[in-house]
Amino acid sequence: MNEPSPSLSSAQLKALRELFPGEDLLTHPADTLAYSYDNSQRQSLPAAVVFARREEQVRALLEHCNRWQLPLACRGKGTGTAGASIPPTGGLALSLERMNRILEIDPDNRLARVQPGVTNQALQQAAAKHGFFWPPDPTSAAVCTVGGNLACNAAGPRAVKYGTCRENTLGLHAVSGSGRLLRTGVRTTKGVVGYDLTRLIIGSEGTLAVITEATLKLSPLPQARRTLQAVYTDVNSAAAAVSAIMAQPVTPSALEFMDAQALAMVKNYSDPGIAAGAGALLMIELEESTAAIDDAAAQVAATAEIPGCLGVETATTREQVQALWRTRKALSPALRNVAPKKINEDVVVPVSRIPALIGGLGELEEKHGITIVNFGHAGNGNIHVNLLIDPDDPAQMKAAEACLDQVFDLVLGLGGTLSGEHGIGLVKREFVSREIDDPTLSLMRQLKEAFDPLGILNPGKTLP
């Protein structure tokens, strides 16, 4: 269906049809509905959805939008949880999912060039044929796009060893909000000419420019991997173990944490054989050379065995690895079963402050009568705080709002930050001024105006 949208003029529709012919333009509400929401549970119906296939289309579209003063939001597959890809009501949704070509894999220089609609998984599969991988690996890697990863600086568990998108991206092609083509960064691992616009655009959630191509830094695939599971009597012991593990020379590729509430929920959903008396659990993954892996695993296991440790188990076969990960993988379906519309925040605190964070969250849970489940990437202090509420219950929603407000105060008081990788979008926008002072916000607004003087790109997102 492609009936005209009542909020677009005939001249605007004509120009859009010429730029995005056939199936690359949707205007009927029944078709645009699928592009009106993302994983944040927010929704706003756009006047039209356009599917870009070439960089020049994006540039021309931005020129049109500036002339019409018509706002837009770009998106990949809509897996974001902060509402950054929600389109402006009556504006445009620019989907980049059809710009999905892998343009180059250059193993000699350890880089890849891709369009933004390439899925993380497709990139990993292509790079693996040459013995490489791209370190960012969000949980949604099978469907999320590289452009979306870059827009939110989404990294996943491997960031503890390899860094985030910012550390693994060499350069970008992008179109600014004013319609200018930008080329940022380099093809080399060193380069200091000019300001670092690459890192500025990454994580800006589509508010400064639309990424149309990325040059990514690849890493060699590890020769060997070991998985360890360590169980503790309480969160303080687990957090002390995290600090000890991160202080020794072997850096894990993943260091995941689950608190007592998370373990109890998994037990109730599908008991994976968690030790009695377990109050916290760490999943540790190591990636090293074949020659080094056994010694590395032994060193990390010994470091993890601190007072309060109930045991450390090391897997050496595929079946053992799957058995150890069963606890962690059972958590998401358990949460969906109990609270399908939970509030999930991805706050970050210094690793040494994890016990204080979990303790403070326990006090807020009791104060507001809301079950809070915590898990996440303990190696860099990135904890996913899940408020299990029913959004259809006004009393619970009121309690959740007050609780969330105090969660953010707690995080900032511990020297943390409001988001590690989910981003700000619509969901956390009102809290940003608590973390960033007025002079800094003023400079950020000036940067926004320089890239996007008419405020065309993703209005109402990221900055308060």
Image (spheres, helix red, strand yellow):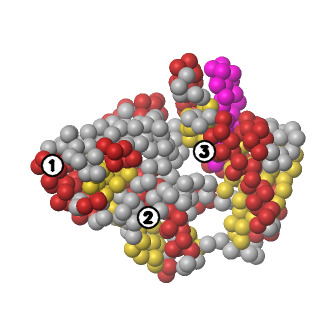
Q: Indicate left or right for 357 with 241 as reference.
A: left
Which sits earlier in the primary sequence, circle 1 or circle 2? 1
Q: Mark 3 points at which residue?
A: 382
Q: Which badge, 1 or 3, is on the more N-terminal residue?
A: 1
Badge 2 marks a residue whose secondary structure is loop
Q: Which of marks 2 and 3 is in front?
A: 2
Say above or below: 254 vs 428: below
Residue at 71% x, 59% y is 285
Tell me where the magenta segment starts and ends, as one range. 350-377
Amino acid type at image mark 3: Asn
Query: Left or right: where does residue 272 sit relative to residue 11?
Result: right
* Cα separation between marks 1 and 3: 44 Å
User: Residue sitting at 80 percent across and 49 percent down?
Assistant: 272
Badge 3: residue crowd in 10 Å (few <14, some 14–19, many ≥20): many
Q: Is mark 1 on a helix, strand or loop?
A: helix
Callout in the foreground (1, 3): 1
**Percent x, y for residue 154?**
50, 52
Kindly report the distance in space between the C-alpha atoms of the residues bearing marks 2 and 3: 26 Å
The amino acid at mark 2 is Val
Q: Distance between the residues labelled 1 and 2?
A: 29 Å
Question: Which residue is most to the front?
Answer: 1
Residue 180, horizontal then vertical, whole percent: 22, 57
Q: Which residue is drawn at 87% across and 50% down?
A: 311
Relative side of 313 to 51, left or right: right
Residue underneath mark 1:
12
Which residue type carries mark 1? Gln
Task: State the residue in front, 141 or 110.
Answer: 141
Q: Mark 2 = which residue?
A: 118
Work out whether 451 lies above or below 113.
above
Specify few, some or many for label 1: CA neighbours under 10 Å numbering under 14, 14-19, or 20 or more: some
